[in-house]
Image (tube, helix red, strand yellow):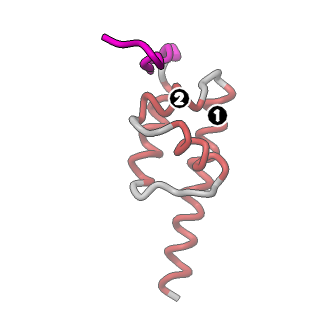
Amino acid sequence: MKYSRLDAIFRGAMDEIQTQLALLHDKGWSDAAISDELGVSSVTVFRWKNGSRRPENHRSVLLMLRMLGKKKRIPKKRRTFKKAGVRD
């Protein structure tokens, strides 16, 4: 019984996270922009969106997603990559 209650709580949290991610995408946010703001990989955001993974700290993630939804502007992509074959 105890596990089924916890599973229901996590399932509800995942539904809410997926809803928040969908709202952000509707506002123009990309997985990369969301992941940059949360400090996680874009693959992680993709897995949350698909429901194949759930964050251990789902309450914090949900709070951060709600805060991102309140931002007026979507930040530009901040990632920088080293070019292959270029030496210093």
Q: Main secondary structure of the magenta part?
A: loop
Q: Is residue 72 left or right of residue 56?
A: right
Residue extending furthest toward the left: 88
Q: Residues within 10 Å of mark 1 (few under 14, many from 20)?
A: some
Whether residue 72 is visible here, answered yes or no, is: no
Vertical placement of residue 30 versus 60, above or below = above
Q: Is residue 25 at all visible to an observer of this figure? A: yes
Residue at (53% x, 89% y) in the render: 1
List the residue tagged with mark 2: 69
Reply yes or no: does residue 9 show up in magenta. Answer: no
Q: Which residues are magenta?
A: 73-88
Give the image location of residue 60, x and y in percent. 39, 47
In the picture of the structure, the residue carrying the numbered disc 1 is 23
Label 2 crowd (10 A; few <14 / some 14-19 / many >=20): some
> Are circles 1 and 2 on residues that touch, CB within 8 Å?
yes
Q: Quadrant of residue 43?
A: top right
Residue located at (56% from left, 81% from top) = 4
- Residue 9 position, x and y percent, is 52, 67
Quarter holding residue 82: top left
Residue lying at 52% horizontally and 17% vertically, measured from the top left: 74
What residue type is disc 1 on? Leu
Image quadrant where one finds the C terminus: top left
Residue type at mark 2: give it: Gly
The answer to whether residue 86 is magenta is yes
